[in-house]
Structures are given as structure tokens and as C-alpha cells.
């Protein structure tokens, strides 16, 4: 079990960038999805009811997310490459019309849901005042594809009673960098 090192956000960003720049730590794989927990009080959420019921509050890169790893000693969860923009995803409110048996037999395929943008700010985030840095908390799970293995890996997040923190995903739009801050976690493959 790892427990993220607790620093101020600026110090954490510098520490994590140092690990990544020096190639320290170990690779886990490519981030697929971050599953977020309950929205903190006072944080705006602009997701459809259908999306919340079907998928919850997520940041979903599918198989095109950044690479993640662990710091030396497995203490911190690291984002080791640039964070690409969130891609569009199928509209959760779309319900495909039912095909008749004749349409199925003739080879007609069911309609696909239209794609809609994933706007990070709409997914329940706080912004650090005067910056383009968003904080997504609490992180519940981080799903990833391990390097060289055709399975999913999972980072389970927990609150850290000692520091009073929860795992938080920090996204810096100006640099395209991502960080995980606070909380505790276990990695399962």
C-alpha cells in the first residue's frame, strides 16, 4: 500500500516532475479512466442525470490516457507523460431504436450513440485561484492498462486518516501535466 507524500501542491508538482525527469520509480501502464467519488460540497457538477446513473463521475481517456507509474519506494502515484485532452464519449442519454427481426436478418446494424465532449470543469472540479489548475477529488479508482499485459490494472484509493487527505487528481492545463496528491492507495493487477 502506498500513501502519497503530503506537500503543498506546488512542492508536490516539483517533486513529482523531478522523479519523472530523472526516470526514477517504476512504470505501471497507460491511464484509461479515473473514477471519482462523491462531489465535495460547493463544487459545481454539470453532468446529465443519465450519465451520473449509468457511469458516475469519471474522467475517461479510453486507451489514450497518459502513462502512470510509482515513485521510488512506491510512495506516490505519478503521471509520467503529458495528459491529453479528454476525448468525446458516447452520449449516455442515447437510446438506440429497436431493430426488427427483418432488419437484423438483412444485416442492418443498431444505431450508435453520438459523441459528446467531456468538459473537465463540468465533471466536478475545484480550480486553484488565479491558475488553470483543476482539482478532482476524491479519486475512488484509477483504471489503467499495464505495460506488456493484456488486462486492466486498478489503483484503489482511500482517505489517509493521518494527514486528513483523500487522493486528488491535479490537472494543470497550462503545461498539460497531471499529478496525484494526498490519500492512500493500493495497486492491483
Image (tube, grey):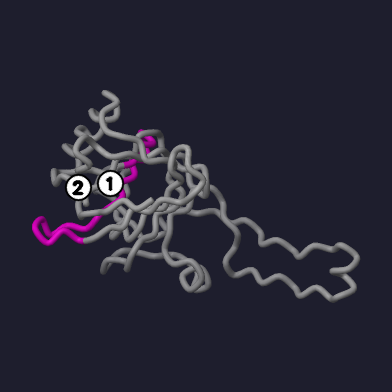
Up-down: is 54 above or below 144? below
- Residues tagged 2 and 1 counted as in contact (Cβ below 8 A): yes
Residue 121 vs residue 26, the one in the foreground: 26
Residue ID at (40%, 34%): 82
User: How many neighbours does mark 1 have within 10 angstroms: few (below 14), some (14-19), or many (20 or more)?
Assistant: many
The label shown at residue 4 is 2
Would residue 41 appear left or right of 147 to someone viewing this image?
left
Up-down: is 42 above or below 84? below
**Where in the figure is residue 33, as x and y percent of width and height?**
44, 53
Residue 44 occupies which quadrant of the picture?
Answer: bottom left
The label shown at residue 18 is none
Residue ID at (34%, 53%): 188
**Where in the figure is residue 94, as x and y percent of width and height?**
64, 68
**Where in the figure is residue 14, as x and y percent of width and height?**
21, 32
Task: Work out which residue is located at the far top of the displayed protein and give it.
Answer: 22
Disc 1: which residue:
180
* Mark whose residue sits in front, 2 or 1: 2
Amino acid at each position: 500500500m502506498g500513501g502519497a507524500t503530503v506537500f503543498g501542491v506546488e512542492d508536490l508538482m516539483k517533486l513529482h516532475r523531478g522523479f519523472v525527469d530523472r526516470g526514477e520509480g517504476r512504470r505501471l501502464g497507460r491511464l484509461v479512466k479515473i473514477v471519482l467519488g462523491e462531489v465535495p460540497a460547493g463544487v459545481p457538477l454539470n453532468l446529465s442525470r443519465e450519465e451520473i446513473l449509468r457511469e458516475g463521475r469519471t474522467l475517461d481517456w479510453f486507451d489514450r490516457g497518459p502513462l502512470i507509474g510509482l515513485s521510488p519506494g512506491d510512495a506516490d502515484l505519478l503521471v509520467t507523460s503529458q495528459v491529453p485532452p479528454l476525448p468525446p464519449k458516447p452520449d449516455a442519454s442515447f437510446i438506440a431504436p429497436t431493430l426488427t427481426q427483418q432488419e437484423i436478418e438483412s444485416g442492418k446494424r443498431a444505431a450508435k450513440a453520438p459523441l459528446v465532449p467531456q468538459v473537465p470543469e463540468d465533471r466536478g472540479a475545484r480550480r486553484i485561484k488565479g491558475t488553470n489548475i483543476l482539482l478532482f477529488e476524491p479519486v475512488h479508482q484509477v483504471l489503467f492498462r499495464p505495460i506488456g499485459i493484456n488486462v486492466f490494472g486498478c489503483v484503489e484509493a482511500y482517505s489517509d486518516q493521518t494527514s486528513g487527505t483523500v487522493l486528488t487528481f491535479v490537472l494543470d492545463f497550462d503545461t498539460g501535466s497531471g499529478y496525484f496528491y494526498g490519500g492512500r492507495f493500493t495497486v492491483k493487477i
